[in-house]
Image (tube, grey):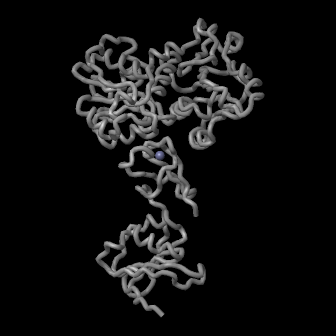
Amino acid sequence: MLVVEGVKNGIVIDHIKAGKGIEVFNLLNLGEADFHVALIINAQSKRLGKKDMIKVDNVMDLNLDLLGLFDPNITINVIENEKVTSKINLKLPQRVKNIIKCKNPRCITSIEPYIENEFELLDQESCEYRCVYCDEIYKIEK
Amino acid sequence: MLKGKHLIDLNEFTTDEVDEILELADKMVKNPLDYCEIAKGRILATLFFEPSTRTRLSFEAAMLRLGGQIIGFSSPDASSTSKGESLSDTLRTVAAYADIIAMRHPKEGAPRLGAKFIDAPIINAGDGGHQHPTQTLTDMLTIKSIKGTVSGLTIGVCGDLKFGRTVHSLIKAFSRYPGNKFILISPQELKIPQYIKTQVLEKNNIEFIETEKIDEVMGDLDILYMTRVQKERFFNEEDYIRLKDSYILDRDKMAMAKEDMIVLHPLPRVNEISYEVDEDERACYFKQVEYGMYARMALIAKLLGVDK
Ligand SMILES: [Zn+2]
């Protein structure tokens, strides 16, 4: 049995779909972190069977918005003094750069590769984004 | 203050800003010589990565009538794009020569990209099937000049309402003023997109009706805005044959309209308006071309900040 020590003060990103942990890890740029981070792959889960998890010690203020975009089913627990003190509800970020690619073949981003694909949130409920260049709508699948 | 702004999408200008442009344009229509030197020493670059002679000439005539000068190109082979230069490099180069840029590009969002790289005002002179804000300003100025108002009008739009971007922006623009009502006349296949109905019309409590038959509504209209219906847009030949004549404006249909109704068209027309209608005083599509130049004059003067 692999033992990873608990988080004293920090966050636990839980219920990541098995195999996707590394993507979340990279999305949050945790490879460059100067604090303790544990990436756990294929942990047991009652809900998912298998899941990935990320534990982060001593940091509370990661930009977690991107996770809502990546997978709205992820849960996040805030840990203080080794106890879960709150859960963060994931919200879709207002603006995302270089994560969604515009699918409109007539969009300027299709021929000028140096510009970032940039989308703006249209509606939190319907999970729709709009390309800031051509207004193409992109819907995030839940 | 409009000085130094880009015009990428007319919706990004406030109603006050749009009114400001229309008011200046109105003064220019009345006393064009008062403004014939205000842009002296300034250069407009017309960068047409896709040919559109009418629009380019309108911009060039506008700048020349303000006393300014023009540089530019009118096809992609004349620009360095054909040698593989990026759009941002082309624009940064041109911005070193010109004070203001009017650009047309086949790709949607191209002027938005330009606005990220340069400070000189960029005017979107059409980006693919996306936006063409100076056409909308033209339509507004024409209506305001001839009808004396941009409110309380019953505006019929007829033809290809699905792909016709000029119609979409016209509806967006007039939905910002009180009391306007729309009659949307099109074949089933070419109905207005749902988002215009929900996001623009319903959201702003704008009254509208949809119909296939122009005859039934002709007498209610203050403005009839015609657009092209292309044969290839129809799904089947039968529908095309059934409907093709009902979207050709002729003398008989004009007889059903109010005496002060006006007919507009973004031009060029193919066959949707019979030549016999041209003689009718209510046919205003060639006046519309002239107003287009004045609308661009006012816009250039405002963005350059030389309107005083
Ligand atoms: Zn796009």
- Tell me if I can see residue B87 in this picture: no
Q: Is residue B12 left or right of residue B244?
A: left
Q: Is residue A55 above or below residue B212?
A: below
Is A87 or A4 nearer to us in this picture? A4
> How far across and how far down the image is residue B37, in percent?
26, 15
Which residue appears at 59% of the width and 9% of the height? B278
Quarter that holds the C terminus of chain A: bottom right
> In the image as oriented, which residue stretches furthest toward the bottom?
A1
- Tell me if I can see residue B278 in this picture: yes
Is A138 or B38 nearer to us in this picture? A138
Which residue appears at 51% of the width and 34% of the height? B129
> How far across and how far down the image is residue B67, in percent?
27, 16
Which residue appears at 50% of the width and 36% of the height? B130
Question: How many numbered tags mark residues here?
Answer: 0
Residue A46, picture quadrant: bottom right
Q: Is residue A10 above or below residue A124?
A: below
Residue A34, picture quadrant: bottom left
> How far across and how far down the image is residue B203, in percent?
58, 43
Is A126 or B217 nearer to us in this picture? A126
> How far across and how far down the image is residue A30, in percent?
36, 73
> In the image as oriented, which residue stretches furthest toward the top?
B279
